[in-house]
Image (spheres, rainbow, N blue to C red):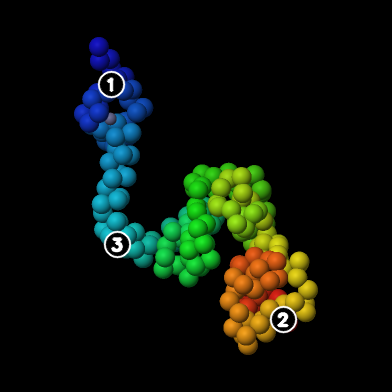
C-alpha cells in the first residue's frame, strides 16, 4: 500500500520514502539513487559540455569559486593529486601517473585526513605519501607542512652529494632514475634537486 510518506520511483519502480527523493518544488519522479546514477552517466557522455559549463561558471562567479576553494582546501589538494596521477597533460604526470602511482582515495578521504592531521593549523599543508613508492591510499597518506615534505629525502643527502648529483646530471647526462639508484634516494628528490626546487641555496 502506498502511504502518504512513500512514493514509487518511476525509474527503478521501487517504493521509497519521501526522503529518498530530492525535493525540487514538489518531489522528483526519480529517486535520489536513480538521479545520481543518471548524473554519473550524463557526466561521462557529456564531458565536453560539462567542462564548458564549468569554465563559464568559473568566469561568471570568481568570488564564489574563491570562497569555495578557501573552505575546501583538501578538495584542491585532492584534485591536484588526481591530476598528477591521471591527466597525461599534467606537467607532473611523468613523476606520478607514468610511474604507476594511482589515486585510490576519495575526496572524503582527503577531508578526513585534513581534520585528522589538523592541516588547517598548518602554514602550507601538503599531502604526503609516507612511502613514496606506494599509491595515494588512506593508509599511506597524511597532511604535513610543505617544507617537511620537500625536505623528507633531502635530509639524507649531504651538500657534496647534491653538488655531485647536479654535475652528473648536467655534464654526464646521467638520467634521473639512475641517479636516484646511485644516491639511494627517490626519483622525485633527484628531480627537485636538478631543477633547483630543493637545495636552492647551493
Ligand atoms: Zn529509483
Kindly identify which residue carries mark 3.
52
State which tag comes first along the sequence, 2 or 3: 3
Q: Is residue 80 visible?
A: no
* Residue at 29% across, 56% down: 47
Q: Mark 1 and mark 3: span between their CA atoms?
A: 37 Å
* Residue at 28% across, 60% down: 48
Q: Mark 2 and mark 3: span between their CA atoms?
A: 48 Å
Kindly identify which residue carries mark 2.
164
In the picture provided, is 71 more to the left or to the right than 162?
A: left
Q: Are marks 1 and 3 in contact (CB under 8 Å)?
A: no
Q: Give the camera-side residue of 101 and 117.
A: 101
State which tag comes first along the sequence, 2 or 1: 1
Residue at the far bottom: name it. Answer: 171
Q: Residues within 10 Å of mark 2 (few under 14, many from 20)?
A: few
Q: Which mark is residue 15?
A: 1
Q: Are marks 2 and 3 in contact (CB under 8 Å)?
A: no
Amino acid at each position: 500500500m502506498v502511504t502518504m510518506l512513500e512514493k514509487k520511483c518511476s525509474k527503478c519502480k521501487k517504493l521509497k520514502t519521501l526522503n529518498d527523493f530530492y525535493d525540487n518544488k514538489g518531489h522528483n519522479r526519480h529517486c535520489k539513487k536513480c538521479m545520481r546514477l543518471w548524473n554519473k552517466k550524463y557526466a561521462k557522455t557529456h564531458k565536453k559540455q560539462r567542462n564548458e559549463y564549468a569554465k563559464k561558471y568559473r568566469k561568471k562567479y570568481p568570488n564564489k569559486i574563491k570562497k569555495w576553494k578557501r573552505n575546501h582546501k583538501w578538495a584542491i589538494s585532492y584534485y591536484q593529486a588526481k591530476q598528477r596521477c591521471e591527466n597525461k597533460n599534467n606537467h607532473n604526470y611523468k613523476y606520478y601517473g607514468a610511474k604507476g602511482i594511482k589515486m585510490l582515495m576519495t575526496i572524503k578521504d582527503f577531508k578526513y585526513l585534513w581534520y585528522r592531521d589538523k592541516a588547517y593549523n598548518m602554514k602550507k599543508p601538503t599531502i604526503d605519501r609516507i612511502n613514496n613508492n606506494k599509491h595515494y591510499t588512506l593508509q599511506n597518506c597524511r597532511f604535513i607542512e610543505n617544507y617537511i615534505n620537500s625536505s623528507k629525502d633531502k635530509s639524507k643527502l649531504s651538500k657534496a652529494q647534491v653538488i655531485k648529483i647536479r654535475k652528473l646530471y648536467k655534464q654526464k647526462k646521467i638520467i634521473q632514475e639512475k641517479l636516484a639508484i646511485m644516491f639511494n634516494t627517490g626519483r622525485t628528490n633527484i628531480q627537485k634537486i636538478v631543477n633547483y626546487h630543493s637545495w636552492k641555496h647551493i
